[in-house]
């Protein structure tokens, strides 16, 4: 294996809530290789959202280092972070987070718009992305005219549009029924087979098991291959 | 991201909220159109006054006397008329008199003057004749009347040859003046002109209130004015406070400074409504930012920089104010034309005012858009994404 795409070491993040200091992330270290399909599992309040924000470059650590593709995220400013999010990371959210006033095609075009891609190329690449998730003929529809599964597929196409290094999926099936969830997971598996690095964040063990590697997070601490831990905890 | 793309995006979001955008624009529309209407009316009346003053010719000097200690007699006036470059001199006594004919009676402005008045003040008769020097000499009880006076007392009849009672004395009407229209709120048509000598009797004063001097050419007016001032100074030493000499240019300057002040004042008042419109835009943009917090979060998560978000909202504000400004210009010109045709006011539309008010509306958009746009661009993406 080559150099890991994500290298996180001794990451700390603390919040002050009502006078008490909460360690959202406590000394977290993890390495993720290119092409991996990894699930991060943890109950709510475990710090997984903070970890996701951190990996997604929406937030910066208080201490410790986070190297994404060799770049130290902790040392970048707002604008550089925005560029990194645009080029390296594809977000897939639980609530799809599509812009309701834009069509499916325009939603997929959006990251390319901020990357400064020309209008013609943008259109071509967005259509290609929609084709990958099987929604080419729905390109002109507004999100409100699409089913939940279709919306999430549009969101996946949007995440893929910029050809990012990692896909970051935060509870991608949380708002979908089990049949559609399976479809979305299938798409993600296919994408992984095509070589995309996928980080799946979930609280659902059944979904986490679909990944090739599983880590669990609890009280801000990360444990590799959460199998034993999971087995011992009735909450899963 | 290109500016063109940003404008397209702004237009899209404005279109998606039509009613709100229209109401926001209304503030700018009212502001810009009121600036244009008011300034056009002010400038129209200024142009009107200027052209009226110009009609009298720019080679005119006026001596005004104050108080009665200045015995500006006919001899002295004759001396003035002999000065170099002076073409004609016309002394004037004036007052209000009661004019009566049959059962009609009315207060009318009386002017007692000589034959030169006709050329000096550019007053022509449409019917009959003007006063002659002979009328002055023989103290003829004759009168030349303005067109309004004629219609007041004689209706559609021909007044020439008929008689009027001026302060109880019977005067024969010998001529009717061409209508001049009103200027500075004074009707130029409701007048009675009589020979100077009879006029002095009517107002019971020999004091000459005004003397008009016509120069031979416009270029010499400064020279003639100096000459007249010096002549008057030698005639009336130490009494320079009792008279003043003005030329037409001075009058023009005074008038234009008055109308400029008026234009500025009206424009200023109307600009306040532009400012209020700007506050409306800021208000709506702030609402829009908090309504679209989630959208801002999504955009930031997928790579929008602070600058992109700032531009998006700023351009939206500027497009709102700019489109409002454009519609305002059209509305202003339309309403201005309507007002001018209904109230028969002269309005003059100057392109500079339109361009200026449009640029001002754009500036209002920028000034009042910066604060909400900046607020949007500073939103924390994590919190913005969580916002419902």
Image (tube, coloured by chain):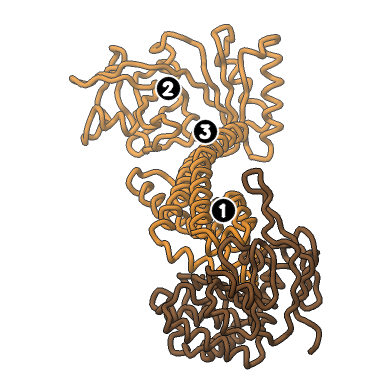
The x, y position of residue B256, in whole percent, is 57, 37
Indicate the chain on which mark 1 is placed.
Answer: B
Residue B283 at what x, y percent from top left? Answer: 50, 48
Which dot marks residue B120? 3
Q: Residues within 10 Å of mark 2 (few under 14, many from 20)?
A: many
Residue at mark 2: chain: B
Q: In the figure, B177 relative to A64: above or below?
A: above
The answer as to whether the residues below labels 1 and 3 share one chain is yes
Chain identifier matching the orange colour in the rendered picture: B
| Residue A27 in sight here | yes
Regarding residue B356, the answer to whether it shows in the image is no
Residue identifier under label 1:
B365
Q: Quadrant of the N terminus of chain B?
A: bottom right
Residue at the limit of the structure toward the front, as seen here: A232
Q: Secondary structure at mark 2?
A: strand
Residue furthest top as drawn: B69
Label 1: few (<14), some (14–19) or many (≥20) C-alpha neighbours in 10 Å = many
In which quarter of the view is residue A76 placed?
bottom right
Residue at the image point whose x is 40% and y is 79% from the top: A147
Label 2 or label 1, whichever lies nearer to me, is 1
- Residue at mark 2 shares a chain with residue at mark 1: yes
In front of the other: B370 or B25: B370
Where is mark 2, residue-wise?
B111
Given residues A180 and B111, the one toward you in this image is A180
- The shade of chain A is brown
Q: CA distance from mark 1 to mark 3?
A: 55 Å
Residue at x 41%, y 49% (from the top left corner): B336
In primary-sequence order, the first of circles 2 and 1 is 2
Distance between the alpha carbons at the discs numbered 2 and 3 = 14 Å
- Labels 1 & 3 near each other (Cβ < 8 A): no
């Amino acid at each position: 294996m080559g150099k890991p795409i994500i290298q996180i070491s001794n990451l700390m993040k603390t919040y002050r809530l009502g006078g008490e200091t909460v360690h959202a992330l406590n000394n977290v270290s993890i390495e993720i290789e290119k092409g991996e399909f990894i699930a991060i599992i943890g109950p709510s309040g475990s710090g997984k959202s903070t970890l996701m924000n951190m990996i997604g470059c929406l937030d910066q650590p208080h201490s410790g280092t986070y190297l994404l593709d060799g770049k130290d995220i902790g040392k970048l400013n707002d604008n550089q972070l925005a560029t990194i999010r645009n080029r390296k990371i594809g977000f897939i959210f639980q609530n799809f987070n599509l812009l309701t006033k834009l069509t499916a095609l325009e939603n997929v075009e959006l990251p390319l718009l901020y990357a400064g891609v020309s209008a013609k190329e943008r259109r071509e690449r967005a259509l290609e992305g929609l084709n990958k998730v099987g929604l080419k003929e729905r390109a002109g529809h507004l999100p409100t005219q699409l089913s939940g599964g279709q919306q999430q597929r549009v969101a996946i196409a949007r995440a893929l549009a910029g050809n990012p290094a990692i896909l970051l999926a935060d509870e991608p099936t949380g708002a979908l029924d089990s049949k559609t969830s399976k479809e979305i997971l299938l798409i993600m598996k296919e994408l992984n087979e095509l070589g995309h690095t996928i980080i799946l964040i979930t609280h659902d063990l059944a979904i986490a098991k679909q990944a090739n590697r599983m880590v669990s997070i609890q009280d801000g601490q990360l444990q590799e291959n959460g199998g034993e831990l999971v087995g011992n905890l009735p909450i899963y | 991201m290109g500016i063109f793309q940003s404008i397209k995006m702004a237009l899209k979001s404005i279109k998606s909220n039509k009613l709100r955008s229209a109401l926001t624009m209304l503030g700018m529309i009212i502001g810009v159109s009121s600036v244009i209407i008011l300034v056009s009316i002010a400038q129209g009346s200024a142009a009107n006054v200027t052209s009226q003053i110009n009609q009298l010719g720019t080679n005119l000097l006026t001596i005004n006397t104050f108080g009665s200690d200045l015995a500006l007699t006919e001899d002295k006036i004759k001396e003035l008329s002999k000065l170099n470059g002076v073409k004609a001199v016309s002394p004037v006594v004036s007052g209000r008199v009661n004019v009566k004919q049959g059962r009609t009676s009315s207060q009318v402005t009386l002017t007692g003057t000589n034959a030169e008045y006709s050329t000096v003040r550019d007053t022509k008769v449409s019917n009959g004749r003007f006063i002659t020097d002979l009328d002055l000499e023989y103290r003829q009880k004759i009168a030349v009347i303005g067109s309004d006076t004629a219609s007041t007392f004689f209706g559609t009849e021909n007044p020439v040859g008929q008689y009027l009672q001026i302060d109880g004395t019977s005067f024969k009407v010998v001529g009717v003046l061409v209508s001049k229209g009103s200027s500075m709120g004074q009707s130029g048509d409701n007048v009675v002109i009589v020979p100077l000598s009879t006029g002095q009797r009517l107002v019971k004063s020999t004091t000459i209130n005004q003397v008009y001097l016509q120069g031979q050419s416009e270029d010499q007016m400064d020279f003639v004015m100096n000459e007249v001032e010096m002549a008057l100074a030698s005639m009336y030493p130490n009494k320079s406070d009792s008279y003043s000499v003005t030329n037409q240019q001075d009058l023009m300057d005074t008038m234009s400074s008055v109308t400029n002040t008026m234009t500025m004042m009206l424009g200023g008042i109307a600009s306040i409504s532009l400012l209020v419109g700007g506050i409306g835009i800021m208000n709506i943009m702030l609402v829009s930012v908090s309504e679209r917090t989630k959208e801002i979060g999504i955009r930031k998560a997928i790579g929008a920089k602070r600058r992109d978000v700032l531009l998006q909202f700023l351009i939206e504000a500027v497009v709102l104010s700019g489109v409002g400004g454009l519609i305002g210009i059209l509305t202003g010109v339309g309403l201005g034309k309507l007002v001018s045709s209904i109230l028969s006011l002269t309005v003059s539309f100057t392109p500079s005012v339109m361009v200026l008010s449009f640029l001002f509306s754009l500036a209002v958009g920028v000034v009042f858009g910066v604060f909400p746009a900046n607020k949007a661009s500073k939103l924390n993406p994590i919190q913005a994404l969580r916002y419902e």
